[in-house]
Amino acid sequence: MDLVQNFPFLTIVFSLTCGVLCAVLRPKAAKNLCLTWLTLTFAMSLSVLIYTLRLDGSFVYRMGKWNAPWGNEIRVGPLEALMATAFSGVMLLSLLGGMGHIFSDCEEGKVNLYFTMSSLLISSLFALIYTNDLFTAYVFVEINTIASCALVMLKSSGRTLVATTKYLIMSLLGSGLFLLGIVILYGITGELLMESIAVKVREIFATGEYSLPLTVVIGFFSVGLAVKSALFPFHSWLPDAHGSATASSSAILSGLVLKGYIIVLIKVFYRVFGLRVIMAERVSNFLFIFGILAMIFGSVGALRERDIKRMLAYSSVAQVGYIYVGIGTHSEAGMVAACVQILAHCVTKPMLFCAAGGFMDVSNGKKAMTDIKGAGRRDKIAGAAFTVGALSMVGIPFFAGFVTKLTLTQAAVSSDNIRMVIALAAVAVSTLLNALYYIPVIFNIFSKTESTGIKTERPRADHAFALCVFMLLNVCFGVFSQELVDTVRRGLELFGM
Amino acid sequence: MPEFLKNLFTNYYETGAVILFGIGFTTLLMHRNLLKKIIGLNFMDSGLYLFLAAKGYIAGRLAPIITNGDTDPTKYVNPIPTGLVLTGIVVSVSVTAFLLALTCRLYDKFHTLDIDEITYLARKERE
């Protein structure tokens, strides 16, 4: 066994350890440890990605070398490694981009806990990406929930507390449904490992027995994870939680946490049920319809907001809709589009939230549109980053957002007629709405104001560095889109095997 | 008695578990009092654990602990669901603790447990 094969397991376990250590360290030391470890995990995930691409296949890592029914497994392929690399990189940049806010927003002496929670969060995200066992997925979904709620509430004010409570309650309802799905599926198949379940599900499906319970189970999984990833009718908690948290938390929650649950859902669809069963069950029709509604209503919600962070949060609702439309198009191409959108949104939205944090720094800490007027002139790097992010969200070529819109449209065209018409119309309307709310903000932040009573200081070096890397990433994403889409497609093929 | 009802009565553990889950779920979703929401959460989780434990039990067999050197697997019940229940209990304990701590802080701040009132007060706080 190659040394690289140990890396996914090590990233999960040492992230947990790092979280525990951060809890007893001083804030500065905790910050250094957390950032160093994140850099290391990024390097490790990248080497795993290169290894799996060279191998052109996936490998299974058995914990303690126990075989299937007794032991626990993680499974690593190019898609998983790509996601892990992107997540660890974005996590690092989001923390750097909002570092000033972390230290000013958290209560005195509790800053190290922020890094504890970040480490636990990245650990659970890695576990969700890699795990091959449904019950392990459930446990890490809960760890993810607790860590992300704690990240919201570390900025202690009445509003964040209320937002956290609502977020936690909705998340718990979602995980309750998810666990019920697992329990019933375990009752039907008697297995928890994804591959073994897949074999049994295929047998059961062929005989036509248990067709109603299978539909119900798919429904529980879909609804449970849709609640947790804020699909349209269940999105009410998201603007509060993401809008009131500190800059890094908003970036991490929008960019990574929502995606973690969607990856679990894709995993369940691909590796537990298999695409054929999912298509026959027609559950994806609902995901498709709600995805379309999310694209429209999320954008409408964003259009009505006068607060930049809440606007970005509503925009996340719309972007999650794109992912679900991709999943709902009933095809491999649609799944590719969904995965590309996961990556594109995860490099774009954290940049926007960090830039918004930069605007707040140069506008006396306020975040209403009228208060941040001219902020792009006072913090030029944040202004540039926001412009790049906004153009990417609108879907200008050579930026990340364009790649998703392109792959999603291609997937829609290759789908059946009704879906094609609806999806194309929704993408058009949503693009228009995106432009309607992002372009005025760009004008707003670059408009001239007589800046009286606002103290302007140089932006922090780590903030500027993170934003520059984000911009570079976004452009690279747009320019090397073909290679990326090919990697994702190959990864998905291996993912389903 | 129709087939459907008969199935409900033969699998009475599962029926009870799902009813418990339903009660807990609606309480967690609908109730305005935060403490009752937490009780609902625990109802919901208990329902799930009952379901799992019932799935693992095989009538007439022993708990899977070897005391007399008998390693014949057909004499014992399935141990995996029990293990899952234990893991699940750990998860629900920590979630409950977190939610209780949050409730304490909310009560300290707003002096009420009613979530609607708290939302209203928090909104007023901003303006």
Image (spheres, grey):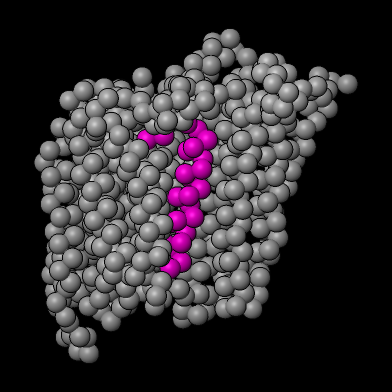
Q: Give yes or no for residue B47 being in the magenta stretch.
A: no
Residue A431 shows up from this direction = no
Rendered location of residue A198, percent (x, y): 48, 20
From the viewer's side, name the closer residue of A355 and A105.
A105
The residue drawn where x is 24% and y is 27% is A2
Q: Quadrant of residue B21?
A: top right
Which quadrant of the rendered structure holds the C terminus of chain A? top left
Q: In the rendered structure, which segment of residues is drawn in magenta?
A: A130-154
Q: Quadrant of residue A424?
A: top left
The residue drawn where x is 46% and y is 41% is A290
Does A495 sit above or below residue A229?
Answer: above
Does A215 sit above or below residue A393?
Answer: above
Rendered location of residue A39, percent (x, y): 22, 51
The residue drawn where x is 41% and y is 40% is A128
From the viewer's side, name the closer residue of B25 and B117.
B25
Rendered location of residue A225, percent (x, y): 49, 42
Does A375 sit above or below residue A468?
Answer: below
Q: In this figure, what is the number of numbered marks?
A: 0
Q: Residue furthest bottom?
A: A453
B72 on left or right of B13:
left
B119 on left or right of A59:
right
The residue drawn where x is 58% and y is 9% is A207
Residue A9 shows up from this direction = yes
Rendered location of residue A398, percent (x, y): 12, 45
Q: Quadrant of residue A125?
A: top left
Q: Residue furthest top?
A: A207
Q: Give yes or no for residue A145 being in the magenta stretch.
A: yes
Which quadrant of the rendered structure holds the N terminus of chain A? top left
